[in-house]
Amino acid sequence: MTKRVSHQEITKSDIVKNEEFIGEHLETLREFAERGDVSVMYLLGCYHDGGFCEGGGNDPDEAVKWYKKASRLGFASAMNNLGAMYLCGQGVRKSAAKASKWFRKAAELGSVVAQKNLAEMYRYGDGVRVDLAEAAKWYRKAAEQGDAEAQGILGVMYYYGEGVRKNVAAAVKWYRKAAEQGDCGAQNNLGVCYDKGTGVAQDRAVALKWYRKAARHGNACAQTNIGEMYETGRGVVKSAVRAAKWYEKAAAQGYAGAQYDLGELYASGNGVAKDLHAAEMWYRKAAEQGYADAQYKLAYMYDFGLGVRASVAEATKWLRRAAEQGHAEARRTLASSM
């Protein structure tokens, strides 16, 4: 999966906070579990499971034992966690098929976390065939239960037509639901819709409001979008100085788009003192992440010796990388040099 699978209900921090109590009463809890108390079975599973996909739990074999017992009695949270153990190969032989089986069982019982885990398997093809329609179906079930993350992802799927018919109005609806719950990705995406007038009437003031909400949570894309608004004077008083500050926030987080934009400011001396060495540094950071425009600019700097020692070999290397991603100008430059 592209991200860590999710625990159900009882988190690792919950176990840590109650670890002393559970440890002192472990034998009593086991007695309750052996008598058929399914919630205690699940609690014991969580206690022995220190986390998924991060090197294993304290005793994954024991965790699996209790998850299995609780799962056989229909406890959805245990089913989800058992699925996660199978997906990561903790305490059991790794098996995406068994993971999806247990996620599905829990999801059908209404577990939001399992619904998202199953959706993610189908969205990214993690051990199963990619099926965006199936992914959208399970994200919708979680979203309709009020889960902000699922709402935001469902919005993205509607925006791009992934597994559903493209519908920007529906995308805005789900973005808004997630954004109002504080999901920063959805806040940024809702800002984009208002910025572009996609699915809603264009309103740059509202766009900036949502960008700022996301930016306060550290969302690098939103920080970059604010920077671009200030650089172009789009809905705000134009200020390259303010643009640079916002780009710096996002660039420091490794966001390639902001790194490129910051390189552009240093190359031109717009909003910052002109500094070709700094421009090269930021272009390179973005280029090394595969950002084609930055790769092209880096090639240009090597070709003319701007901020770096001129090098035909380096210029050609970066031109090729940009061209391989379809960068039109890089392709034309390469073609004309042959």
Image (cartoon, helix red, strand yellow):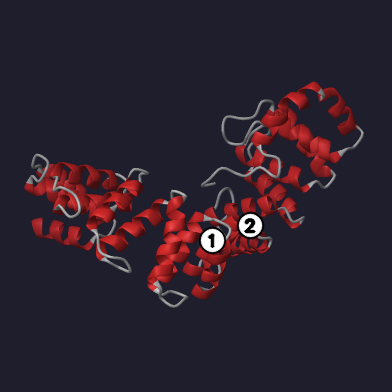
Q: Nearer the viewer, residue 1 or 250?
A: 250
Mark on residue 179? 1
Residue positioned most to the right: 35
At a point 86% along the width and 33% down the height, the residue shown is 33
**Residue 124 in the image: above or below residue 16:** below
**Does residue 93 appear anywhere in the picture?**
no
Q: Quadrant of the C terminus?
A: bottom left
Amino acid beneath label 2: Asp
Residue 274 image point, x, y percent: 13, 48
The mark lying in front, picked from 1 and 2, is 1
Mark on residue 147? 2
Q: In the picture provided, is 256 more to the left or to the right than 122? A: left
Q: Quadrant of residue 329?
A: bottom left
- Secondary element at image label 1: helix
Amino acid beneath label 1: Ala
**Does residue 7 appear anywhere in the picture?**
yes
